[in-house]
Image: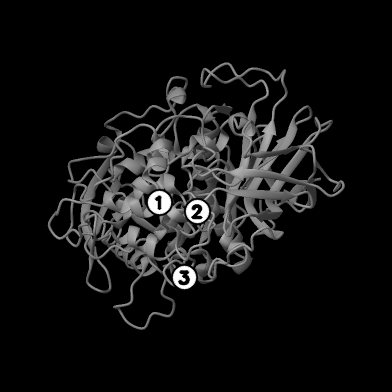
């Protein structure tokens, strides 16, 4: 609509995970009595039979007040709809407390093969178009069959259904719009996974080593319903994640961590036989092949129904799913230009918009008060009410693109994204660390990529399940290393606003035959900037703070094709383009815009051996070699600049 304005562990991370500093500086401002849901809702647990006979465990919370009809709001999840038992209640239900308190029928479902549902789980199950019989199932058909049962069997429903979910549940919310049930009127995919070769476990083909501990969560199979965890997360035995992975060596050495005690019919893994399904997929399929392509949902959004209103929600500092939300929004715009399709992007990390905390931090950086709370009240609740309880017209009163300027710390509304008044502007990586709109002379910068001392992604010494805080970390620790090249503008004399994607157009060379290339866009704060009074790690200060605004990696072998990797020719100048996801950020007057370029980012991503091998997951110690890398000054960064 151009003219109108993702186990309980992970789920807990999605809505309430925060750094140590944040926990000491934020307060709950939206209080809900622990017994509110039990006092105001009836709970029912049912098994809904799918078209192929498999039964899915479904939990239904219905308002005790039966004087009116209510819409159905549903979340399908691989993370469990616990607590199980009709006398066991969640403390909060639904997307937010407003939608819970005003009354809606809230439904949770364990997806096929997870927790209390029957069937075989398929991680990012591929969509099947033009199904020919009832044996052909996918998440679209399971959602359709579930909605069909709900609207015909749940009392006091008004016939309208909405879906929502954060992260993996966001993937299922997107999926619900494909071949959608007629009763589905609204969907809000939030931090939605779009493609596992570009979200979460990979970024442009580079393996996110920092997600290693999460692999077994998705790869340990079961074929009977279970109300407790059947998988085991690897214990690294240390708090120093950097040193652990450095000592571990090649990725093939990590196979030994997939050892599981046999639990009923669970597939087990041994050090000499890797049977964890997801880990096996990862290590046997290093390229974008017939395993990964079908799992991508973005390319199938041409099958989404234009009758389903969508509101995509994401965080500009989401370390897990940034590709998915942006690409989902753009794909719906492209394939369904007449559909009601909107996006909301705020100053959040993964799922933080669902938090009830007043102060909004990402890592050390403070963006303001009540940002999440206001979104829940003024945007999310209004969206679902309009399409599930209101007239459902395209004139919802909400903006097409509601985005937060992470530099000015203020919201803006646009009728298009990227904004119609944004233009492309290139800046060149010149000599003497200069970043400017003009290419000056002919020069190059050289650095040695030492695989025994890779560049850390964070200066924090700790082990995390999935990394988040680094997205706004102070980058001075990296800027002062010899293997990180720096280019920056003069002090800005006026505000400079980026609105849209960023393309790094590198011209590089290496003495080896493979390399990773990482580009970071950094906002360098003035020396005399106003101090942030709380929420920051003790060793930091806002004076000269190097705020990472955006970053991305390109595994060099995939520079021309994700399907067909190519080695570099040693010492030959080569083009490497890296797309960085969209930003909306004003580099304010008195600040500087800085670009950092490096070739390791550890252990966020695995180490590239810097020697071309068919499969990095099976590389040996002998393949890993230090190399010298060159960046030429006709390299440029193409920005989307708001005029």
Q: Quadrant of residue 33?
A: top left
Q: Nearer the viewer, mark 3 or mark 1?
A: 1
Count neighbours of disc 3 (C-alpha within 10 A) and say few if under 14, some if 14 to 19, many if 20 or more: few
Q: How many marks?
A: 3
Distance between mark 3 and mark 1 Cα atoms:
23 Å
- Identify the residue position indicated by label 1 in the image: 250
Q: In this orientation, does residue 160 appear? A: no
Residue shown at 34%/51% (left/top)? 253
**SS assignment at label 3:** loop
Distance between mark 3 and mark 2 Cα atoms:
22 Å
Extreme-left residue of the structure = 264
Q: Nearer the viewer, residue 619 or 554?
A: 619
- Identify the residue position indicated by label 2 in the image: 609
Q: Are marks 1 and 2 in contact (CB under 8 Å)?
A: yes
Q: Nearer the viewer, residue 123 or 225?
A: 123
**SS assignment at label 2:** loop
Relative height, residue 343 to residue 175 (above, below) = above
Query: Could you tell me residue 516's position as x and y percent?
Result: 57, 52
Q: Is residue 639 left or right of residue 326?
A: right
N-term mark: 1 or 2: 1
Residue shown at 78%/49% (left/top)? 633
Q: Is residue 119 left or right of residue 140?
A: left
Image quarter (top left, top right, bottom left or bottom right) of the N terminus? bottom right
Relative height, residue 402 to residue 27 (above, below) = below
Query: Could you tell me residue 257's position as x and y percent?
Result: 28, 49
- Identify the residue position indicated by label 3 in the image: 289
Task: Identify the colour scheme used.
Answer: one colour
């Amino acid at each position: 609509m151009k003219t109108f304005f993702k186990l309980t562990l992970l789920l807990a991370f999605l809505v309430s995970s925060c750094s140590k500093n944040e926990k000491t500086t934020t307060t709950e401002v939206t209080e809900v009595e622990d017994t509110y849901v039990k006092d105001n809702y009836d709970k029912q647990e049912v098994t809904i039979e799918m078209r192929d006979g498999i039964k899915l465990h479904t939990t239904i919370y219905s308002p005790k007040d039966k004087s009116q009809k209510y819409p159905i709001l549903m979340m399908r999840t691989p993370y469990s709809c616990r607590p199980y038992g009709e006398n066991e209640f969640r403390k909060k239900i639904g997307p937010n407390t407003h939608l819970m308190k005003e009354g809606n029928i809230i439904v949770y479902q364990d997806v096929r093969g997870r927790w209390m549902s029957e069937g075989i789980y398929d991680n990012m199950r591929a969509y099947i178009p033009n199904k020919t019989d009832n044996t052909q199932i996918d998440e679209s058909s399971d959602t359709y069959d579930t909605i069909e049962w709900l609207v015909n069997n749940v009392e006091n429903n008004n016939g309208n259904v909405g879906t929502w979910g954060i992260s993996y549940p966001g993937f299922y919310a997107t999926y619900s719009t494909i071949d959608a049930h007629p009763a589905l009127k609204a969907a809000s995919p939030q931090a939605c996974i779009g493609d596992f070769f570009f979200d979460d476990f990979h970024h442009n083909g580079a393996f996110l080593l920092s997600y290693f501990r999460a692999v077994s969560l998705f790869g340990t199979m079961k074929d009977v319903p279970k109300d407790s965890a059947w998988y085991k997360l690897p214990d690294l035995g240390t708090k120093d994640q950097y040193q652990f992975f450095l000592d571990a060596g090649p990725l093939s050495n990590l196979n030994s961590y997939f050892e599981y005690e046999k639990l009923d019919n669970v597939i087990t893994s041994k050090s000499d036989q890797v049977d964890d399904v997801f880990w096996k997929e990862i290590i046997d399929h290093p390229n974008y092949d017939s395993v990964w392509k079908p799992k991508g949902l973005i390319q199938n959004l041409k099958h989404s129904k234009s009758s389903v209103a969508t509101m995509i929600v994401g965080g500009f500092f989401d370390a897990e799913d940034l590709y998915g939300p942006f690409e989902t929004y753009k794909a719906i715009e492209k394939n369904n230009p007449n559909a009601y399709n909107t996006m909301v992007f705020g100053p959040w990390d993964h799922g933080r918009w669902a938090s009830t905390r007043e102060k909004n931090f990402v890592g050390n950086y403070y963006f303001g008060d009540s940002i999440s709370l206001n979104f829940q009240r003024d945007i999310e609740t209004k969206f679902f009410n309009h399409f599930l309880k209101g007239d459902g017209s395209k004139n919802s009163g909400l903006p097409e693109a509601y985005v937060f300027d992470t530099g000015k710390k203020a919201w803006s509304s646009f009728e298009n994204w990227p904004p119609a008044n944004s233009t492309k502007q290139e800046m060149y990586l010149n000599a003497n660390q200069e970043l400017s709109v003009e290419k000056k002379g002919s020069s190059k910068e050289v650095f040695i990529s030492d695989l025994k001392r890779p560049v850390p992604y964070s200066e924090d010494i700790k082990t995390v399940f999935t990394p988040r805080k680094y997205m706004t970390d102070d980058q001075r620790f990296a800027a002062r290393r010899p293997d990180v090249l720096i280019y920056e503008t003069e002090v800005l004399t006026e505000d400079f606003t980026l609105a849209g994607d960023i393309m790094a157009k590198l011209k590089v060379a290496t003495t080896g035959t493979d390399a990773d290339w990482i580009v970071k866009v950094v906002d360098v704060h003035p020396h005399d900037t106003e101090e942030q009074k709380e929420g920051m790690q003790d060793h930091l200060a806002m004076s000269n703070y190097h705020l990472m605004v955006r970053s991305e990696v390109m595994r060099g072998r995939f520079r021309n094709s994700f399907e067909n990797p190519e080695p570099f020719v040693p010492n030959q100048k080569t083009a490497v383009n890296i797309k960085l996801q969209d930003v909306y950020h004003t580099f304010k007057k008195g600040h500087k815009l800085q670009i950092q370029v490096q070739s390791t980012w550890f252990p966020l991503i695995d180490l590239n051996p810097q020697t071309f091998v068919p499969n990095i997951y099976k590389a040996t110690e002998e393949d890993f070699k230090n190399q010298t890398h060159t960046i030429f000054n006709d390299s440029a960064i193409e920005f989307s600049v708001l005029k």
